[in-house]
Amino acid sequence: MAETLSWSAFEKKYQFEETVYLLTKKSIKLIADSTLKEEQFCSFAYNCHSFYGHILLSFDTDEMNKARGYYPPDWTYVEVEEYIPEINVLWEELYSPIEDEYFRIMDSIDDTLLFDSYSTGFLTCLRRIMVRIEREDLLARYLKTTPSVWTLVTEVDADEEDEERLLAQERLVISSVE
């Protein structure tokens, strides 16, 4: 069996954070050039799974969904890739090899600390990317958005309040190092 990299070595080898950021930015630009360009978006999420390394880009246009407590998959475009095939092609080409290697590692780990390091590292990177997207006002730069866009990094069956707290915590961490 091949040696398993630490999360930090994996992240560095695959430039995970920068790759996902650039893919997200390109995807947002593709949305801006698509039939969805007239939609007004109120929410954006990385709808993901930290065991598989799977990431979906979810967008919503119904501002009442936050008040209702609706999280993906109850959003308008839970998988925006289904509506814009170019996004799917982009991620398939550039992210799938990373996702496959990530899952291969996760599926073979029998060390709880290493397993936790990967799942926590994966989610923390996505949160840092989300904060970067917010700070760069990336959504409003390319898409029609509501004045206050709700952003989220969430997993299947996650505690959504905890997910929101962890994203808020990441905002504070990034603010404190600036």
Image (tube, rainbow, N blue to C red):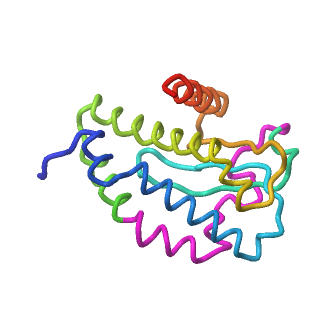
**Image label count:** 0
- Viewer-proximal residue, 127 or 47? 127
Residue 143, position in %: x, y? Answer: 75, 61
Q: Residue at x 45, y 70 (%)?
A: 92
Stretch of the chain drawn in magenta: 67-96
Q: Could you tell me which residue is drawn at 21 percent across and 44 percent down?
A: 5
Q: Is residue 105 magenta?
A: no
Please check the rendered image and state whether residue 89 is part of the magenta-colored stretch, yes or no. yes
Q: Is residue 97 left or right of residue 46?
A: left
Work out which residue is located at the far front of the displayed protein and give it: 178
Left or right, residue 115 beside residue 30: left
Asked if residue 34 is positioned above or below residue 132 in the image, the reply reads below
The image position of residue 118, as x and y in percent, is 35, 39
Where residue 95 sits, quadrant-wise, is bottom left
For residue 154, side relative to residue 71 (left or right): left
The one of 143 and 80 positioned closer to us in this rendering: 143
* Left or right for 139, reference 12: right
Q: Position of residue 19 (x, y in %)?
A: 42, 57
Q: Name the foreground residue: 171 vs 53.
A: 171
Q: Position of residue 11 (x, y in %)?
A: 32, 46
Q: Is residue 59 above or below residue 173?
A: below
The residue drawn where x is 56% and y is 27% is 175
Vertical side of 23 occupied by 73: above or below: above
Q: Residue furthest right?
A: 64
**Residue at 50% across, 75% down:** 89
Corner quadrant of residue 66: top right
